[in-house]
Image (cartoon, rainbow, N blue to C red):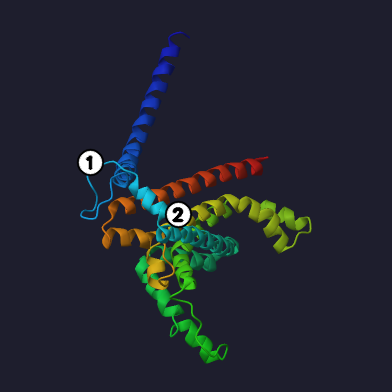
């Protein structure tokens, strides 16, 4: 027995070492791709602002954060971005849940068609999707032309160059990812739960509300995080389909970098957005953990 114990310990040690060897490349990848760039961003944010150069290398200051937090234009952009991200997230989760449920209940060719539509949208370049949205929703676009021709409306509906356009454009970007997040959870639901609900007299709507939705909450939370993080950093959709009033943090950072050459302020604003995303991720992680705990009880 005593001779067998060292052998077991050796095997456990080899397993532990092999696990570390597998994790090490991931840790290095995170350091190179995420930690180091964020550290560089934070370092630029902590330099003195300058009117003659992008930033004063070798200096230390929190002037960039002070400027971002006191400049009304930037604080307005930050608050608008948060509201914009929440609005897009709510709509995205609602639409994606319905679409994912339709995929889950569909069979054969219909299910394949619905899934291919999602994947095709994901694989299409963002700029291409947004220009397609302009062609569909502009005053002379497909939607308005069709509605006017059918007699449903007499004047074009303003769906671009405003908040509606920015939201529509951002939904074009985030909805496919949210659909897959929700569908990945829906596909794990035991069909016997649906049958049990129907055997107890619940109709389709009640079964969906009381059986499907509670089990889908983790996927909805993950999809919500995806939508929120994408929308907090939104740039292309508000720029192409919004107006000057839809000034998001992404647009403000581009303006600070490319027009004002104020790298310290731009980096400070970027750090604040990143911290906001981390807080959203932490909240979602806690919520998913509690939801799973409640489901298992």
- Residue labelled with disc 2: 229
What residue do we see at 56% from left, 88% from top? 153
Residue 172 percent coordinates (x, y): 45, 67
Crowding at mark 1 (Cα within 10 Å: few <14, some 14-19, many 20+): few
- Quadrant hosting residue 239: bottom left
Camera-side residue of 253 and 145: 253
- Tell me the mark number nearer the camera, choosing from 2 and 1: 1
Residue 110 percent coordinates (x, y): 54, 68
Q: Is residue 61 above or below residue 250?
A: above
Residue found at the very far right of the displayed protein: 201
The local secondary structure at tag 2 comes to helix
Give left or right: position of 164 versus 38: right
Residue 86 percent coordinates (x, y): 52, 59
- Residue labelled with disc 1: 58
The quarter of the rendered structure image containing the C terminus is top right
What residue do we see at 70% from left, 55% from top? 210
Q: Is residue 16 above or below residue 27?
A: above
The local secondary structure at tag 1 comes to loop
What residue do we see at 56% from left, 91% from top? 151
Q: Is residue 270 above or below residue 158?
A: above
Q: Earlier in the sequence, mark 2 or mark 1?
A: 1
Please give the count of numbered marks on the rendered protein.
2
Crowding at mark 2 (Cα within 10 Å: few <14, some 14-19, many 20+): many
Q: Is residue 285 visible?
A: yes
Camera-side residue of 66 and 182: 66
Residue 208 percent coordinates (x, y): 67, 59
Q: Is residue 189 visible?
A: no
User: Alpha carbon of mark 2 to alpha carbon of mark 1: how far?
Assistant: 32 Å
Camera-side residue of 272 and 114: 272
Q: Check contact, mark 2 vs mark 1: CB within 8 A.
A: no
Instruction: Return the mark for residue 29.
Output: none
Residue found at the very far top of the displayed protein: 2
């Amino acid at each position: 027995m005593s001779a067998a114990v060292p052998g077991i310990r050796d095997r456990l040690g080899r397993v532990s070492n092999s696990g570390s060897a597998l994790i090490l490349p991931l840790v290095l990848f995170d350091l190179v791709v995420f930690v180091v760039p964020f550290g560089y961003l934070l370092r630029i944010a902590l330099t003195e602002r300058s009117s003659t150069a992008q930033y004063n290398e070798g200096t230390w200051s929190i002037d960039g954060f002070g400027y971002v937090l006191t400049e009304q234009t930037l604080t307005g952009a930050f608050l608008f971005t948060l509201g914009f991200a929440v609005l897009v997230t709510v709509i995205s989760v609602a639409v994606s849940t319905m679409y994912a449920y339709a995929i889950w209940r569909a069979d054969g060719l219909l299910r394949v068609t619905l899934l291919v539509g999602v994947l095709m949208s994901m694989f299409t370049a963002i700029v291409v999707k947004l220009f397609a949205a302009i062609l569909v929703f502009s005053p002379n676009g497909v939607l308005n032309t069709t509605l006017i021709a059918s007699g449903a409306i007499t004047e074009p509906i303003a769906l671009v160059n405003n908040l509606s356009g920015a939201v529509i454009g951002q939904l074009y970007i985030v909805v496919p990812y949210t659909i897959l997040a929700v569908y990945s959870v829906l596909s794990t639901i035991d069909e016997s739960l649906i049958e049990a609900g129907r055997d107890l007299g619940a109709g389709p709507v009640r079964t969906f509300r009381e059986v499907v939705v509670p089990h889908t909450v983790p996927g909805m939370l993950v999809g919500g995080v995806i939508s929120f993080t994408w929308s907090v950093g939104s740039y292309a959709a508000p720029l192409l389909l919004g107006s000057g009033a839809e000034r998001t943090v992404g647009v403000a950072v581009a303006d600070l970098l490319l027009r004002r050459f104020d790298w310290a302020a731009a980096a400070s604003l970027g750090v604040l957005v990143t911290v906001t995303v981390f807080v959203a991720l932490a909240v979602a992680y806690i919520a998913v953990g509690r939801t799973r705990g409640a489901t298992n009880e």
